Amino acid sequence: MAKKILIAEDHEMSRILLRDVLQYHGYEIIEATNGEEAIKEAGAHLPDLIFMDIQMPVMGGYAAIKALKSDDKTKHIKIVALTSFAMIGDKEKSLAARADYYIPKPIDTVQLPIMVAEWLKE
Amino acid sequence: MAKKIPSAVSKLKPKTGDSQSLRVLIIEDSEDDALLVIRALKKGGYAPEYERVETAAAMLSSLKDKTWDIVMSDYGMPHFSGEKALALLKETNIDIPLIIVSGSIGEETAVECMRLGACDYFMKGNLTRLSAAVGRELAEAQSRRERRIAEQSVIASEFRFKELFENMSSCVAIYEARADGADFIFKDFNRAAEIAEKIDRKKLIGKSVLQVFPGVREMGFWEALQRVWKTGRPEHYAASFYKDKRIEGWRENYIYKLPTGEVIAIYNDITERIKAERKILESEEKYRLLVENSSEAIFIAQDAKLKFANKASQKLFGMSNEVLTSIPFVELIHPEDREMVLGLYLRRLKGERVPEFYPFRIVASNGIVKRVEIHSTLISWQGKPATLNFLTDITERKQAEEKLALNFETQAAMNALLGLSLEGRTIKEFLESALDLVLSLQWLAIESKGAIFLADKAGETLHLHVHKGFSPELCTICKTVPYGHCLCGRAAALRAVQFADRVDERHDTRYECMPPHGHYCIPILSGDKILGVIVLYVKEGHIRSPWEEDFLKAVANSLAGTIERKQAEKALRESEQQQRIITDNIQDTVWLMDMNLHATWINPAITKAVGFTLDELTQMPLERQLTPDSLQQAQGLILQHLTAENLADKNKEINVSGEFEYYRKNGDIFWGEMNISLLRDADGKPVGFLGVGRDITKRRQMENALQETQKQLQVAYRLAEIGSWNWNFSDKTITWSEEVYRMIGRDFQQLDFHDTKHPQIYTRESWELLKKTANDSLKTGKSCQIELELVHPDGSNRWVNWIGGVIYDHRGKIAGMHGTVQNITERKRMEKALLEAQKQLQDAYRLAKIGIWNWNPSEKTITWSEELYRITGQKFEQLTFPDTHHPQVYTRKSWEQLKRAVNDCWKTGKSIQLELEVMHPDGSTHWLNWICGAIYDNSEKIIGVHGTAQNITERKRAEEEIRQHRDHLEELVAARTTELRKVNAELADENNRRKAIEEALYIAKEQAEAANQAKSDFLANMSHELRTPLNSVIGFSEVLKNQLFGPLNEKQQEYVQFILGSGKHLLNLIDDILDLSKVEAGKMELNPQIFSIKEMLTGINLMFREKALNHGIHISMEIAADVPAQINADGKIVKQIMFNLLSNAVKFTPDSGSVKITAKFAKDNNSVTLAVEDTGIGIKTDDLPKIFLPFSQIESPYTKTKTGTGLGLAVTKRLVELHGGTVQMESKLGKGSKVTIIIPISA
C-alpha cells in the first residue's frame, strides 16, 4: 500500500509542487493549509510522514508539531519541518519542537524523493 | 356391557389407493343390509372399514373403543332403533354424523329423525346418493369440529385473559371511547385498580371517566388516552398524581389501544421507587458535596493521571482542576519520591498488598515542596481499575516531628552521656562509648569517623586516646599531636572549636590516602585547662552549624567533668593499690597479755616493725611503747571498756581497737593499728588479752595523700563551679558536695528531699520545677536537665544547671538519684542582659515611634510591634501577608509598592526604603518611612523579611511647609534675577542657536540610522516574500526539466532551462541582499568556534572542482607551515567569504586559466591571511575603489557573458569587517586579480 504523506503548507504553489513531486513517486498525499488542519488530518489519516511548514496562518508549524508530538495517537509520526527563512536557530527551534527532520526551503525536487524514501525506510 | 358378536364383524380392506378410507359404524340387525350399505359406499369411491352392532350396549362400546367417521343406523330393529341410536349418540356428546338407512320409513318418521339430529336418511332400495351425502356430512362434521376448537380456544383465551386481568398486581382499566373520543367510559376495572383507587368497580363500569374523575384532565392522562385512541400508538409515561391538591405520588402508565377499539391502561404506583431514587440522588449529592468540600485532598488516579480531584486537592497542589487532571500525576511528585510512589501505585494496581498509608513529597504549582501522607484504595472507576486516594498535608506535622526528634535526640544523647559518665569504667572504655555515641548520631551529618585526644600534663601535646575508623597509618601520624599545628592542635591551643569543611591547607599534617572530609575539633575544657580534643569527621562540604557546635560543646563539657573525675579516680585507685601491696607485706603482730596488760608472748614479726627484741618488749612498760597522746587514748579506751561490770558479765565480749603512734627502737614514731580482745576461760572468767597489731604508717600516708587529691578534685569542681549531689532513698538524705553548699549558701546537713527546709534553697518556681522534674525522672527512669534559680541567704540569687539521673540498686530497683549542679549565673546574667538590651532597643523604637514588623513566609504570618498598631490605628487578631487586611491599612498605591518591595527583598535580599501612605480609621492619613530587609539563616539563605516603619507625617508636613516657604523665596529671587536674565538672554540665544544646529545634526543622524535599519528590515522581509514564489518557480521548472510528467521538446527544454537559470540567479541575488541587509542591520552575529582552516579550504575547493575541470581551470592551494592546525574564528563566515571569493575567481577566469589559494599566519597580530589569486579578466585600476560597493559590476568586455549578482564582493567585505578583518584587492586588467583578506583568529 502506498505510504501516506501529509503536507501542511499555506502557500498553494509550494504545496502543489511538493504534492505533485511526491505523488509522482507513488505516495498518497493529504493536504492541509494550516496547523489546525494538519492536526485534524493527521488524526484522521495517520500518515507515515508529515511535511510541516513553519510559517502558517491560524496555527503555525511549531505549535502543530508540539501538539502532534504530545498526542499518543500521532506522536510516532515522523515530521519534517519546512522553513523558508533559513535563519540561525530555526533548525534548533524546529527540532526543539520535536520535529524529526528539518529541511530549509527551497526544496530540491531531485534530492527530496531520495530523502523521503530514506526517512520512511527507518 | 354387551359382548361383541364376532360373526357380525367383518372388515374390508381398501380396494385401491385412490379410494377414501372411511370408518363406518353400522347399526343394523341384518348383515346383508349392512353389506348393501358397504357396497353402496364402495361404489361411491370409499374404502370403508366397518363394524356392525345391533344393541345400544354394543354401540356404546364401539363408540368408546374406536373412532368413527360416520354412523349408519337402521330405523327399526328388534332390540334397538334409529331414534334410540340418535339419542344415545347425542348423550355421548360425540360429534359423528348419523345417517338413517331404513327399509321403509314414512315422511313423518323421517322428519322426526331429522329433528332428532339425523343428518339424512335413505331407503335401502335407493342408496345411489348415499356416498354423496356421506361426503357432505363428513365435510360438515369437519367444519363443525374446527369451529368448535376455535370456539373452545376463544373461550379458553377469554378465560385466561379474565384471569390475568383480574389477578394482575398492576392496576388495569379498560376504556371505551364515546362521542368520537370526547369522553371515555369505564369498560372494566381490575381488582388492583379498585384497591388503588379505593372505589368499587360496580360504581364505575359504564360510567364516564370525566364524571367519576373530573381531575383526570389535569393529569396529562386524559390527553394520553385521547392520543392513544386516535393514533393507536402505545404510550408509556410516568406522572405524579394528586390527592387533596398535594403531591401524593407517582404512577407509571402504559396505555395501549386494543384491537376492539377499546383503550387499556395499565398503571403502577411507583411512588416508593421514585422516592428511593430521589433518596439515592440526594445521598449521592450529599457524598459529592462531602467529597468536594472535604478538607482532605481526595482524588482518583487512573492511567497515571488524575481523573477526579476535589477542591482540597486543587488547593493542595495549587492548580486548577483542568491542570490537575491533564498533567501526568508523576509530575506532581517530588522527583526523589517518584520511583517509590509509582512503584507502590503499580503494585497496588496489580493487586499486590502494599502499605495503605505512606508519606511522600509533592511539588505544588509554586514549587513548594509539601510532605503528604497518602491513603490509597483500589477501586473500579468507569469500568477500569483506579485508585481512590486521600492525601493529607503533613508538612507541619513532619516539621514538628523532626524538631521533636531533634530535641529528643539531643536530650537522649546528653542523657546517654550522663549515664556513661556514671558507670564504673575505665577512661578508655568511657571515651570509647562516648565517641560511639556521638558518631551514632546521624543528624550531625558526621561520618562514622572520629577520635578523642587527651592532653598531657605538660600541656603541649595531645595523645590519641580512642578512635573510630582511623586507618593504622593515620593512627601513627596522629598518635601525638603538638598544640597549634593542625586543626586539633589549634583547638587545643586556642581553647576554641575549630571547623573546616574539607581537608585544606590549614592542615599541616597531610596524609595521602585521606579521603575528602571536613572536621569538627572540639576542645574538652575544664575551666581554662585543656583536657583533650574531640575530633569528628564530617562529610566534605558540610556547613558549620552553631547549633551543632553548641551541642558538641555540651558533649565536651560533659566529658570534661567525667574525664577529670576518672583521672582522679584512677590516681586514687593506683594509690590504694600501692598501699594494699605494702600493708599486705607487713606481717601482723600478735601478742598475749595478762590482765595487767603486760605482754606474755609476742610473735617475731614485731621485731621488724619496732626493732625491739621480744625480751625488751615484754619488759617494757607501755609508756615507752606509745607516744603520750596515744597512751592516753589507749588507756582511755581500755578503761572505758574494761569496767568491772563488763568483766563480770561472762557473756560480754570485749573488743577494743584503735590507731596509735608507737615508738620504734631508733626513736622513730610509726602508726599502728591495734586490736585487743579479752580472753576468758571456760567458765567465762577473764584471763588475759589477745592483741593484734599492724604497722599502718604507709596507709596513713596514702590516706593523707588521698585526702589531698580529693581536695584538689574539689578545687577543680569549685573552679568549674560544678557540684554533685546524691539522694539516697535508704537513709532518706541528700548529700551535697562542698561546691553545692557554696552555691546554696546554707548548712543543711542530713536533709531529706521532702524536708520542709529544702524549698528554702530555691525560688518558688524553681522548687516546683525541681519537684516535678525529679518525680518525672523517677517515674520514667530518664535523666533530666533543668535550670534552677537558687535563693542565697546573702540576698543574691544564683542560676544553676541541674542534671539528675536515677540510681538503680543491683536488683534494678530505684535506689535514689544523683547528679550535678553547675553554676550558670554568669550565662544567665548575659542572657538577661541580652534581653534587657533587646527591650531597650524596643523601647528606643517605641520612643522614636518606629514600628517593627516581621514576615515569616513559611507560615505566611506577619507580626507587628505595638507601635505599628498605634500608628495605623488598626488592630488585627492574626496578620497574614500577602492578604486582604493590608489594603484597608494602606492606600492602593502604597499597598502595591509595599507588596513589590517585600517580594523583591524576599527574592534578592535587597533592602528597600519607601514612603508609604496609611489610612487611619479616624479619617486622617499618615506617612510611614518604611524599610525592609531580608532575614538570613546561618547558611546565608533568606528565610524571611523584616523591617521598620516610622511615622513621618509630621516631618512630611514640615517639609511641605519648607517647600512652600522656599517657593515664596524663589519668587523674590526670580524677580531679582529677571534683569540678570535679560543680560544673559543674548548669550543664551547664541547658545540655543548652536544647540539647535547640533540637535538638527543629531536628529538627521538618528533618522539616517533609523532609515538604514528600516531598509535592512524591509530587505530581510522582502527577500523572504520574494523567495517563496521564486522557490515555486525553481521547483516547478526543475520538475518540468526532469520531465516527470511527460517529455518536453527541445525548445521547451531550452526555455525551461532559461526559467530555471533565471530563477536561480534571482535566488542568489536575494540571498546576497539578505546577507547584506543582515550584516548591515547588525543581525548577523559572530559565532567563534575551533576549526581546521585546511579542512575548510579543501572542502570549498572540492565544491568548485567539477566546474573548474569543465573549464580546464587549475585550482591550487598553498598553506604555510606555520598556520595553526586549529584556529578559533567564525568558521561559517570565513567559509562563506572564501566561497564568494573562489566563486568569483572561477567565474571570471577564462578556460585553461588557474586559481591559487594561499593561507598565511601572522604571529605578531595573531591573524590569518587568506588570498585568492586568479588569471582572470581583471579590472581597471580606476575601478578598484568601486569594486566593494553593492551592485557595482564593472563593465568589461566579458560582463555580458558573466552572470553575478554584483553583491558578492560587497557581502564579502562586510563579512570580513564583521569579523574584525580587512580585505583588499589588487588587479590588472586582462591579467588577473588577487583578493587578500586578513582575519584575526582569536576574536
Image (cartoon, grey):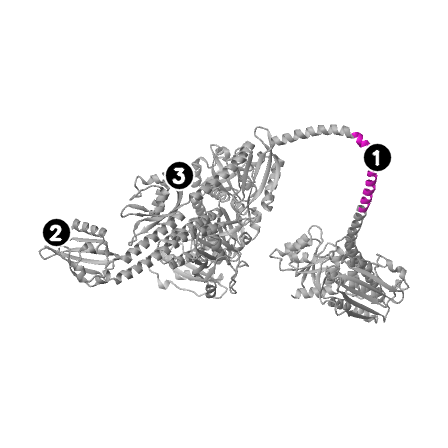
**SS for tag 2?**
helix
Whether discs 1 and 3 lie on one chain: the answer is yes
The residue type indicated by label 2 comes to Leu
Residue B260 shown left or right of residue B1044 in the figure: left
Kindly identify which chain the residue marked by label 1 belongs to: B
Q: Earlier in the sequence, mark 2 or mark 3?
A: 2
Residue position for label 2:
B647
| CA distance for labels 1 and 2 | 145 Å
**Quadrant location of the N terminus of chain B in the rendered image:** bottom left
Residue B303 shown left or right of residue B601 in the figure: right
**Quadrant location of the C terminus of chain B in the rendered image:** bottom right
Residue position for label 1:
B986
User: Is residue B75 at all visible to an observer of this figure?
Assistant: yes
| CA distance for labels 1 and 3 | 87 Å
Q: Residue furthest left?
A: B683
Where does the magenta region start and end? B978-1005
User: How busy is the neighbourhood of tag 1: few (under 14 within 10 Å), some, or many (20 plus)?
Assistant: few
Residue position for label 3:
B796
Q: Earlier in the sequence, mark 1 or mark 2?
A: 2
* Predominant SS of the magenta segment: helix
Q: From what the image shows, is residue B1037 above or below residue B991? A: below
B1068, B551: nearer the viewer: B551
Question: Percent x, y for residue B1167?
Answer: 76, 62
Question: Percent x, y for residue B1222?
Answer: 80, 59
Residue B973 shown left or right of residue B944 in the figure: right
The residue type indicated by label 1 comes to Glu
**SS for tag 1?**
helix
A29, B1190: nearer the viewer: B1190
User: How busy is the neighbourhood of tag 3: few (under 14 within 10 Å), some, or many (20 plus)?
Assistant: few
> Residue at the spot x=29%, y=62% of the render?
B581
Whether discs 1 and 2 lie on one chain: the answer is yes
Residue A115 shown left or right of residue B494 in the figure: right
